[in-house]
Image (cartoon, helix red, strand yellow):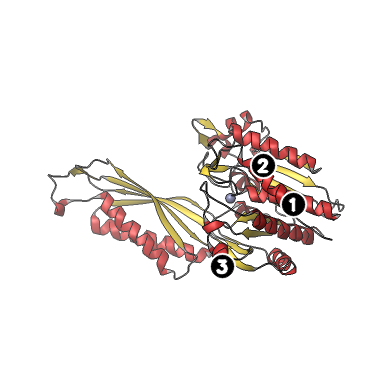
Amino acid sequence: MSVTADIQRLRTELGKLASFSETPAPAVTRVVFGDMDLRARDYLKTLFAEASLVVHEDPVGNTFARWLGRGKSLSPIATGSHCDAIPNAGRFDGTVGVIGGLEAIRALQRSGFEPQRSIDLVMFTAEEPTRFGIGCLGSRLISGALDSSVGDTLTSEGRTLNELRLAAGFSGRLIDVPLSPGAYGAFVELHIEQGPILDREQLDIGVVTAIAAPASLRIIVDGEGGHAGAVMMSDRHDAFLAAAEIALAIEAAARATGSPDTVATTGVCEVFPGAINSIPSQARLDVDVRDVDLRCRDAVLAAITAACDGVEGRRGVTVRLEPINADPPARCASPIVNAITTACETRGLRHRTMVSRAYHDSLFMSRIAPTGMIFIPCRDGISHRPDEYASPEAIGRGTEVLADTLAALAG
Ligand SMILES: [Zn+2]
């Protein structure tokens, strides 16, 4: 059985998909339920139908294209990723896992392989948080990590998720989106690394063993405002300076774990009232903490809480911590890690194990199915930018490893 990806076809289809964009090339912007998202979905469904896959869409627009296996009673396996793109992104994030997943299925079909288990190609709705402020909307709903009530509570420009999905043609109830644990025997996602390791080490494939998960929180510091000239330094309770101390403590806490997999970022700092001649009365920080080890991550969160308490006492301000979300990290399933590794070795590809520092739909699929991820290099590790680039050859190799992995898992 020789399974070979059609590199030219991969390149052409990724190029066509990139043309459905709200911003001019090479940038790609495709916001969920927007006109370009819907046109891209139509294009993909045409490709799915050409490959004789049976297409089904759920009420939030997650799209399932099934290659029917012979063993009707066996649980299916699945691969897939997302096709939405943040403003001014590139053409490979997510799409490589959808078009590559499709080409892996087609390559298996061409080789004469007949799967025992059905193979689903899944395109998840809204992996990016652009529209609704929360990442992995589709896979969160599938896994049950998100309650169906978000249909009325998540909004975009004054319209609810339910209004927007219905307008986009996705009817039915969100309560029917979750899949039960065991619905899939395995889930494998092909994705660009979005980091520099594979490119720097000139490797073909990253075999992902764990996926880091973000915990995010908002820290609100209330101090005392006043005239920048009139209030003496000794009398001040400057909210921004207290927040600055907290931000530095967050950096120190992340460094203190000693693990390269711990990262913490204070990505937002808003200061009120925000005038040059006014002492800041309030400051708001949005903080993102990630690790593949839940205990390490929680230790950082505990250190942040302690730092806030200390600053409160020293500076005479009040500090509130509001958790935004805290998803647990995931371990990849060893049978899938082994199948990916075997595929790399059989094909003589240079590979290594690694963790995923970014999170993906796989983080949520791992709650209902044994999950694995295949990374391919992207140039200089650049992603979420118009100059994001993965070579057709690299995508072809990833697609072939995915095909071998699916064949091993589908039996
Ligand atoms: Zn992605």
- Callout 1: helix, strand or loop? loop
Of labels 3 and 1, earlier in sequence is 1
Secondary structure of residue under mark 2: loop
Counting from the top left corner in percent of width and height, residue 246 is at: 33, 57
Q: State the image coordinates of residue 274 (x, y, percent, origin top left).
A: 27, 41
Q: Which of marks 2 and 3 is in front?
A: 3
- Tell me what residue is drawn at x 63 percent, y 47 percent: 95
Q: Position of residue 8 (x, y in %)?
A: 71, 49
* Labels 2, 1: front one: 1
Tell me the tag on residue 6: 1
Left or right? Give the position of 259 relative to 185: left
- Is the N terminus in the top left, top right, bottom left or bottom right quadrant? bottom right
Q: What residue type is labelled 2?
A: Asn
Query: Where does label 2 land, which residue?
Result: 62
Mark 1: few, some, or many residues within 10 Å (few <14, many ≥20)? some
Give the residue pinned by disc 3. Answer: 201
Q: Are marks 3 and 1 in contact (CB under 8 Å)?
A: no
Q: Is residue 327 visible?
A: yes
Distance from label 3 to label 1 (Cα)?
Answer: 26 Å
Residue type highlighted by circle 3: Glu
Above or below 181: residue 271 = above
Circle nearer the N terminus (2, 1):
1
Given the current orientation, which residue lies at the most extreme front position? 8
User: Label 3 crowding class (10 Å Cα cut-off): few <14, some 14-19, many 20+?
Assistant: few
Amino acid type for the residue under numbered disc 1: Asp
Label 2: few (<14), some or many (≥20) within 10 Å?
many
On screen, residue 322 versus residue 47, left or right, reads: left
Which residue appears at 79% of the width and 40% of the height?
50
Judging depth in this view, the residue of 219 and 186 nearest the camera is 186
Q: How many labels does the image show?
A: 3
Tell me how far mark 2 sits from mark 3, CA to CA. 35 Å
Ligand 1 within 8 Å of the CB at mark 3: no
